[in-house]
Amino acid sequence: MSLFSKQEWFSNIKGDTLSGLVVALALIPEAIAFSIIAGVDPKVGLYASFCIAVIIAFTGGRPGMISAATGAMALLMVTLVREHGLEYLFAATLLTGVFQIIAGYLKLAELMRFVSRSVVTGFVNALAILIFMAQLPELTNVTWHVYVMTLAGLGIIYLFPYLPVIGKSLPSPLVCIVVLTVVYMVSGMDIRTVGDMGELPDTLPVFLWPDVPLNLETLTIILPYALMLCVVGLLESMMTATIVDDLTDTPSDKNRECKGQGIANIGAGLMGGMAGCAMIGQSVINVKSGGRTRLSTLIAGGVLLLLVVFLSDWVSQIPMAALVAVMIMVSIGTFSWESIRDLKKLPLSTNIVMLATVAVTVGTHNLALGVFVGVLLAAMFFANKVSKIMYVESNVLEAGRQREYHIVGQVFFASSTHFMAAFETRESLDKVTINLSRAHFWDITAVQALDRVVIKFRREGTDVEIIGLNAASATIVDRYAVHNDSAAIDKLMKDH
């Protein structure tokens, strides 16, 4: 598909324009907050959000997805900024981009196939909880006006769409922000605004090369951070792309997204910004506000810069309560409420994987760790389930002289113990036939289990014949089995 195809850019102009405006407004306080988390000036997060959103609009593989400075990435930068300074952060951002481009060319996005639906659900629920928790500081130790404004904002967001004609033509989050800002400016009530978050930049970003020595010492400093940023950035981006795929019922090119994220981070690092990635919250706002194509992402980035540089006096008047209401709407909309209703219907293993992913992600605020635990548990449950469908049938062909074993199912590390236990190796027989025509051997552990069974039979003076191996199993058995190698047999028997 061409870079400027109508389908990817201009098939939903009105919806994309309005949703882009909503996202741009919602990005401002988040970018400032993430800058504060990372310990850098607010303009670093704002410039990053502008650069990443604009570049990813052209280079990304998922139309309608929003990428910018994120909290998950900001948390990883804290130590680097504190110990080495801002310039090293820019250098690490550039290296992160390089790693992500390499990941795209290596097609590492294919690894997403190994992330089960229960892990994705747990990830989504954890992010919804984290988004909600991030709003709590704005709702604690505040005046009653803040609660009234937040409730009014939620009322507008959920009730405005029911108004005839106008309710469907304007995104309710945008109406919420505009109405509450006007109310604040007219009433002059004592509540926090975007301007209280930090000073907005008054100049456009300029090209700058990180002022760090180009030597091995610099590389040793930034390499661990760049690798962590690369992994977390791609993980969150791939997960978000999967969620937007589901929301819009359209496919995306995950490997192109990896490369696009890398190019966008290199652009951010060269324009005085920090590393970023896809944002699930903003992407959900975009989709729910009507955004579908690359135009919405481009408008979000472009309008963000125009707002903070040229309209900062107006933007600084936006009450935080309005943006808190929008983010609460996002957390409610992001959370998979079906997963709670389905807890009784779904298998226990599925529920454990989902809940463990949520618990680890929320407990550590580390998205990568939460997904890793979820994938690990899912793999263990799967291996355990598959191992149980292997069984061994035994038939006497000639009493006291010959027996045949039929193996059915998958033989691998999790089922190898059960496989070995099924054979009565001390039975006094002349010949044993092991029929593997309905079995499959997957790994070295399975081959070693077969070796031990054959060797134990032969040690008792029984002749062993193996028949029915399929081509794939025969390949691994022929290459690694040692039951016909006398030296290897001696070693194996000594070890066991």
Image (cartoon, rainbow, N blue to C red):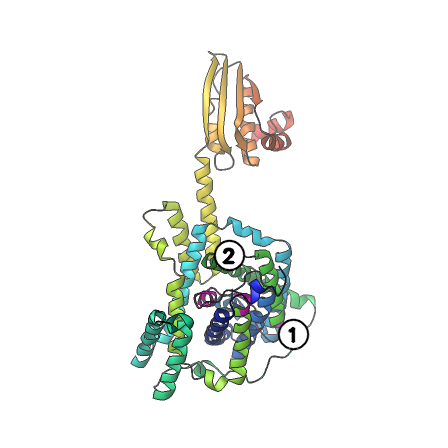
Above or below, 196 against 339 in this view is below
Residue range in magenta is 269-295
Residue at the image position 46 percent from the left and 18 percent from the top: 395
Q: Is residue 280 magenta?
A: yes
Examine the rendering and report whether any part of residue 139 can be seen: yes
Amino acid type indicated by mark 2: Thr
- What label sits on residue 29 in the rendered view? none
Whole-percent x and y of residue 430?
53, 13
Q: Is residue 445 above or below residue 146?
A: above
Q: Residue 412 at what x, y percent from top left?
A: 52, 36
Q: Quadrant of the N terminus?
A: bottom right
Identify the image quadrant of residue 95: bottom right
Packing grade of label 2 (10 A; few <14, some 14-19, many >=20) is few
Q: Is residue 460 magenta?
A: no
Direction right: furthest residue: 215
Write down the residue under mark 2: 250
Element marked by disc 2: loop
Query: Which of the 4 image quarters holds residue 55?
Result: bottom right
**Of the pair 225 and 370, the residue shown nearer to us:** 370
Q: Nearer the viewer, mark 2 or mark 1?
A: 2
Instruction: Look at the image and tell me whether residue 143 can be seen.
Output: no
Q: Is residue 336 above or below residue 85?
A: above
Going 47% across and 71% down the picture, which residue do you hit?
A: 19
Q: Amino acid at mark 1?
A: Pro
What residue sits right under mark 1 in the picture? 210
Percent position of residue 462, x then y: 54, 17
Classify mark 1: helix, strand or loop: loop
Nearer-N-terminus badge (2/1): 1
**Viewer-proximal residue, 5 or 102?**
5
Judged left or right of residue 281, residue 472 is right
Around disc 1, counting alpha carbons within 10 Å, would you say few (fewer than 14), some (14 to 19), or many (20 or more)?
Answer: many
